Amino acid sequence: MEDRKMLFRVGLMVTVTLIIAGIFVVVFGDLSKWIYGDYTVTVRFQQASGVAQYTPVRKNGIRIGYVTNVAMDERDVGVIVTAAIQKKWKIYDNEVCLPQSNIMGDAYLNIVRDPDKAGPAKQIANGGEIPGGSSKDPLQLVTDVQGQFTTTIGSVHSTSESFRGTSDELARTLRKLNAMLDENKTGIKTAIEHANEILSDTREVIGDETTKKNLRAAVQELPQMIKDTHETVLKMQQSMQLVDENLRNVRGFTKLLDDRGGVLIGNLEKGTKNLGALVSDMATFTDKLNSSEGTVGLLINDPQLYQHLNRAARNIDDITRQLKPIVEDARVFSDKIARHPESLGVRGALEKRAGIK
């Protein structure tokens, strides 16, 4: 009986030990490697402070793998870190790996998006490489903040010293002002009395009933005056628009003159030359006309030629009157021949018939 109890206790102890070992394996081990599998990614850093084997790799705060190897670059220009990434997590070529650490000093690698890379992203395959960046250590940040705080304290101290000097200057200025007021007390009193008199006179002027009525009427007319002023301004704007349009038209006309000015001036010069030649010809014609040597001049200036022309005209008139009966007889004869062509023969000569008359 005792042996069975002993065997039961030993078996229970072994079972509990196996359960605890399994818990430790699940908690501290990497079972996901056996469940999901992993792939290798290489990262190059200028410096990787605190990064060692089994340093966790995170993306968006989630652990996606761990560091498997840390080695110096053969060219001694940086550090090459090899990490195992679970296959269910993907890394792209537009991302960068940054070595970071928390307040406790524990290092980890953080994969973030590279703001300098845009466009479509490509997944990193097994054995691929992504660039490594650099980030400040929290302790270094605390040191920088401490330095800035010291600088700020110094600035505050300098500002307080400047403020103290300014307050001393203000105190001296106030003392000088008091001294000036004491010295010019009589003048200031006189100025105040004059100001009181001016205010009193102003009150009397404004308190007059006629002045009040005028002011009230002016205030009542003020809206209409503002309206009239507004209308006047609108009309002035319209006038300015018209002036602007006229100026644009004049600008177009002047531009046309500028473009065709040479042609217009050439035509004008040519027309002027033609007009001068025409005037010269008219002058020559007038001289010839006034001269008694030409035909027209003889016609105008020689009275005997005029008399010959007059007699010739009368002779032509007499001949015309004498030819008129002959022309009439010829018309009658032609009409008679047209009506009775047989009258031209012997029978026509023997038979006497009346014609058209």
Image (cartoon, rainbow, N blue to C red):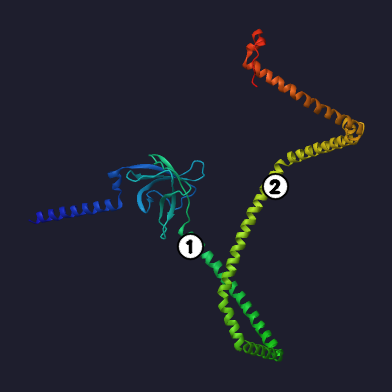
Residue 183 location, x and y as percent?
71, 89
Whether 98 is drawn above or below 227: the answer is above
Q: In front: 248, or 40?
A: 248
Residue 187 location, x and y as percent?
71, 89
Quarter of the image for residue 354 reads top right
Residue 229 location, x and y as percent?
60, 69
For badge 1, the amino acid type reads: Val
Helix, strand or loop status at disc 2: helix
In the rendered structure, find residue 254 and report the number of the disc placed on it: 2
Contact, CB < 8 Å: mark 2 with mark 1?
no
Q: Is residue 188 left or right of residue 217?
A: right
Would you name the residue on which mark 1 appears? 142
Q: Quick one: label 1, few (<14), some, or many (20+) residues within 10 Å?
A: few
Q: In front: 304, or 91?
A: 304
Q: Is residue 300 left or right of residue 164?
A: right
Q: In front: 212, or 109?
A: 212
Quarter of the image for residue 301 reads top right
Helix, strand or loop status at disc 1: helix
Could one spot residue 344 in this view of the protein? no
In the rendered structure, find residue 290 and report the number of the disc placed on it: none
Whether 59 is drawn above or below 357: the answer is below
Q: Residue furthest top?
A: 346
Circle 2 or circle 1, nearest the eye? 2
Could one spot residue 325 in this view of the protein? yes
Quarter of the image for residue 102 reads bottom left
Q: Quick one: label 2, few (<14), some, or many (20+) residues within 10 Å?
A: few
Whether 242 is drawn above or below 218: the answer is above
Residue 116 location, x and y as percent?
48, 48
For badge 2, the amino acid type reads: Thr
At 19% from the left and 55% from the top, the residue drawn is: 16
